[in-house]
Image (tube, helix red, strand yellow):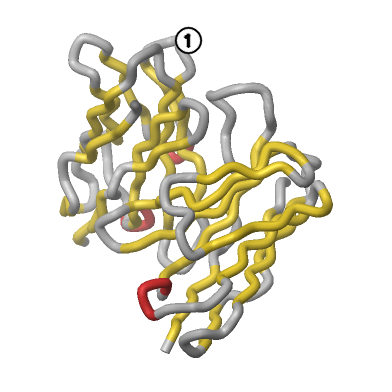
Amino acid sequence: AQSVTQLDSHVSVSEGTPVLLRCNYSSSYSPSLFWYVQHPNKGLQLLLKYTSAATLVKGINGFEAEFKKSETSFHLTKPSAHMSDAAEYFCVVSGRHMRFGAGTRLTVKP
Amino acid sequence: DVKVTQSSRYLVKRTGEKVFLECVQDMDHENMFWYRQDPGLGLRLIYFSYDVKMKEKGDIPEGYSVSREKKERFSLILESASTNQTSMYLCASGQGGGSGKEQYFGPGTRLTVT
């Protein structure tokens, strides 16, 4: 069975400081992993995906994530937060179908 | 751009009513999905379809059914709505051919059952 655990339900940062959203996964085989973002009253948008190529994956809007098999982690980072980054972020593992984490709400303070 | 549209953004229904949620995609995707989204639970898969007239149960199919008569359209049906089905419903589509394929999401339908 596959699953993901997002370690923080809410993260708050100041504008211009780094962002770290943590995700651990469980999979019986080499997984495909995704991060999606959901802005208020909007649909989900793909940020980035890992499918067994490079372990450091770059996404849109300056986000990136690193696949660490030894730690079963796929944490999302951004060097400098912007007000427009405030949203809900979902880590996803994909097998026959996608399994979503519970989500992390990112708040960015001015 | 891929577009997934859902028939309503907001819907209010009474307990016991039959409810239809419609989803249409314009990218000729084989796979279509229905999820419900609840705070603190993320998205949970209700049903998915990998071809016309084909469907499979997801993690929480109880109280729901689906229909896929055309490739571009996937309907979610609540046979007899109940208050515990008050939720945000999201439709998605994606290419077939195994895992690792991105899904494209509609804007969602917020259903309230009173």
* Marked residue chain, label 1: A
**Residue at point 42% right, 46% down?**
B59
The percent coordinates of residue B73 (x first, y second) are 76, 56
In this picture, residue A73 sits left or right of residue B104: left
Q: Which of these two is toward me, B15 or B96? A: B15
The percent coordinates of residue B79 (x first, y second) are 58, 72
Task: Classify A14 as above or below A27.
Answer: below
**Residue at point 71% right, 57% down?**
B67
Q: Which of these two is toward me, B13 or A37? A: B13
Q: Quadrant of residue B106?
A: bottom right
Task: Classify B24 as above or below A35.
Answer: below
Task: Classify B20 as above or below B64.
Answer: below
Residue ID for mark 1 = A53
Hey, which residue is sitting farthest right in the picture?
Answer: B70
Q: Quadrant of residue B9?
A: bottom right
**Residue at point 56% right, 54% down?**
B34
The percent coordinates of residue B78 (x first, y second) are 56, 70
The percent coordinates of residue A55 (x first, y second) are 37, 12
Number of other residues with Cα within 10 Å of mark 1, as a class: few under 14, some 14 to 19, many 20 or more: few
Image quarter of the C terminus of chain B: bottom left
Judging from the image, what secondary structure is the residue with disc 1 in?
A: loop
The answer to whether residue B104 of the structure is visible from this angle is no
The answer to whether residue B72 of the structure is visible from this angle is yes
**Residue at point 81% right, 47% down?**
B71
Q: Which of these two is toward me, A41 or A31? A: A31
In this picture, residue B72 sits left or right of residue A100: right
Disc count in the image?
Answer: 1
In this picture, residue A6 sits left or right of residue B27: left
Task: Classify A5 as above or below A55.
Answer: below
In this picture, residue B88 sits left or right of residue A78: right
Q: Quadrant of residue B39?
A: bottom left
Amino acid under disc 1: Ala
